Amino acid sequence: MAENIHVEIMRFDPKTDPEPVRRVYSVRNEKKNTVLGALLTIREHEDSTLAFRYGCRCKHCGLCAVRVDGLPKMACRTYVRNGMLIEPLGKLPVLRDLVTEREGLLTIYKKHGVFLEEGADSDVPLREDGMGTSLKRCLDCLACFSTCCNYEHGNAGFMGPYFFVKTAQLLFDPRDRQDRRAQAKAMGIEKCRTCSHNCYCINGIDIYRHAIMKLLGNDV
Amino acid sequence: MENTISTDVLVIGGGGAAVTAAVSAAALGADVILASKEPIGYGDTRISMGMIANPCMKEDDSEKEFCNDLLECGEHLNNPEIAWILAKKAHRAREISEGFGHLFQRDKDGLIGPGVAFFSGGHSKARTLRSPPSNGIGIGNALRAAAVRSGVRVLEETAAHKLLKDGDRVNGAVCYDLARGGAIIISAGAVILATGGAGWLYYPHTDCMSGACGDGYSLAYEAGAELTDMEQVQFVPFALTHPAPLCGIFFGDPASAGPAGVIRNAHGEAVLHNVHNRTRAQVTGLMSELLSRGEGTEHGGLLLDLSANLLTEDGRRMWETRNRLGQFDAVRAAYGEKAYRWEESLDVAPTAHYNMGGVKVDTETQSSVKGLFAAGQVMGGVFGGDRLGSASLTEVFVFGEIAGQEAARAAKGARPARPADAKRAAGELTGLIGRCGKYTPIQLKRRLQDVMWNKVGILRYETGMKEALAEFALIEAQARDIRTCASRTFNRDALDVIELRHMLRCALMITRSALTRRETRGAHLRPDCPNRDDENFARNITVRESDGEMKISKPETGKCHG
Ligand SMILES: Cc1cc2nc3c(=O)[nH]c(=O)nc-3n(C[C@H](O)[C@H](O)[C@H](O)COP(=O)(O)OP(=O)(O)OC[C@H]3O[C@@H](n4cnc5c(N)ncnc54)[C@H](O)[C@@H]3O)c2cc1C
């Protein structure tokens, strides 16, 4: 077990580098070592300048999502293997290395009213729909953006799957009184009618069926 | 390079206490800035189990009972007035968090009735609400939404480095903008600290978020505020020991051992029975003793054998409930299916979870320094020597609201920060980029964490703690000779330097307080002073800075009653 394995990590500082470069790092081949474990070891022992986000180390916070061999994964729950390529999530601007832009998310929440209105009554009998419960698995890891064929960062006409999940959470909130379908329309959800439904959630939400179709109404 | 803004109330933090404080201050008409090292709605609040103490759901419960439980658990180091406020206002926690958009589990009639009240560790009554399936994430998402809805100005991934003062009053802070590099000077009429705890002092033996570096304790200390009970650090018994990346991840309290759960040593001998009836401190203390006697496994843990629970109906039902809450998901990832199904023992060791101590405040969450407030885990006094399960989230909302309201009132008429102080602190931050010294800050952090776990961890001896003090001095000296990344963008090295400084100060406060408390009380275990000594130590140990020195409130005698 003791011999080392190699992983490739995409390094990039848009301020100074002409383009991203792959760098090879060697990490100890330990049983059940994770991508996050490897990233942390590299920072501690080899190159502390490597930039990545993480928080809880255990799939609760959603901060460590990256692309591994082309697919979005939670770094804390993906076992590291020889020859892996670790990249930042796609479709989001890269700040540096594996860190993508998060700024602007809350502005979109605000612009489109993606929150429960003030004064909603929580003291009446409330029953949660099973669908709503499944949507609550969203970890805000933003990986779904990178799997959506229509999403382009900064395009104000199409907010992307993450915001459709957030809006659908409210659609299923028994206290909510807003017209969430109209809101989704304003966020560009009509575009989802004609796409190939590739949007994918790391944490197992069926984004197309449980969020997008519900927001589009029955006439899909 | 630096950017200056001003506001009525500056809230530092981004978890439950911070967002509640910000929203509550804004509701009174204050202009508010919310600055958080992580994105808003994160912190330990987001990764919690989302369980919240909500007393008086059943007829046999009362505010008084809840308060008694708090004081009993805290071994009477709590400030009883503050504990009483928590008990009186506990109902606000559910009201506020659900008002933000969260939903706790309802009964079959869709109501919060006695049927959903659950027994949580240390409580005499069933009074805890749960939030499946999203647990803390549901609360975290509600916090994000509430911050947006309230219109407060939000600065994400922005870490407070230093508080600013004018005379004896705190009136702002200098923060580091992680995404873009550079300093932000914020002048404010009042500042609320809601920075959470310091579990990361014990990494990897912690289940807290990586941002829990005790920044708030250090910021308050540096501003001259008094802190209380810093030696009281809560460890919880059942965390994973391996694989390395999952070390320290928490999955259970003593209660989760079930009636038939036993702890075995590496040879398979049962060394601790009746686990589920003991407190967190009792179980972690006994486990640490066994581990220090060399009875542990190759992974540094003991074996938690839950299999006998499966022989009873109750035990099987318990497995199902815990499983539904996702409590054993991490076990499955680390140890596989058999362990997950309790058919195989789990390798477990204690992990750092919560700091009972913190900024000493009055009943309005005002610290000993004017203009500075504290709420949430960073606030001290409410839990004393130990904390009841699920009472932290209650505290976060209750005192977050009070802090927001009081700070909004206090913010009026403050003067702007002194430009020279602000410039100096901002210069310290911009100077963190591209340093060419010998040590990387992350290496120094790891050294500090190692010292804390081994010498100021669960079992504390005078000799070990004195050695720790010497090590801190060495790390502090080496921290002047650092090497950091040259990029201004998302420079983790720079943030590590900021955090290391806070952590060192925090480690010193914990260790000095722990040396002073020459007895065993609450979560503070001194095998060299194994008894509780009410005569000398039924009081709080407080620390503050005075003339550049750490002043500790000394008990009259320093003898051990062993
Ligand atoms: C795994 C786990 C499970 C738990 N489960 C429960 C439970 O079920 N029930 C319960 O009652 N309690 C639980 N707790 C405890 C509880 O979650 C926390 O005590 C509580 O959430 C603390 O809230 P807070 O707002 O004070 O701090 P946090 O939620 O930790 O937020 C602190 C915030 O401050 C920010 N911050 C830190 N330093 C700085 C700085 N220098 N500048 C700017 N921002 C800064 C951080 O980024 C973070 O956003 C649990 C804890 C853990 C670790």
Image (cartoon, coloured by chain):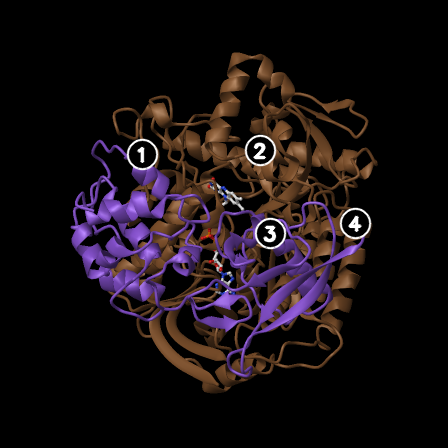
Chain colours: A purple, B brown
- Residue occupying the point 33% across, 22% down: B59
Q: Residues within 10 Å of mark 4 (few under 14, many from 20)?
A: some
Residue B253's disc is: 2
Residue under label 3 = B199
Chain under callout 4: B
Does any portion of residue B414 appear in the rendered image?
no
Q: Which quadrant would the C terminus of chain B be assigned to in this image?
A: top right
Asked if one can make out residue B107 in the rendered structure from this viewpoint, the answer is: yes
Q: Label 2 sits on what residue type?
A: Asp
Q: Residue A121: horizontal and vertical position, in percent?
A: 20, 41
Question: Considering the numbered disc 2 on the image, is that residue within a helix, a strand or a loop?
Answer: loop
Q: Quadrant of residue B35?
A: bottom left
Q: Amino acid at mark 1?
A: Gly
Amino acid type, callout 3: Gly
Protein chain holding label 1: A
Residue B547 percent across, percent down from the top left: 63, 73
Asked if the residue under mark 4 is in contact with the one under mark 2, i.e. CB atoms within 8 Å, the reply is no
Q: Residue furthest top?
A: B312
Disc 2 and disc 3: Cα gap in Å? Answer: 17 Å
Mark 4 and mark 1 in contact (Cβ < 8 Å)?
A: no
Mark 3–mark 1 CB contact (< 8 Å):
no
> Toward the viewer: B553 or A55?
A55
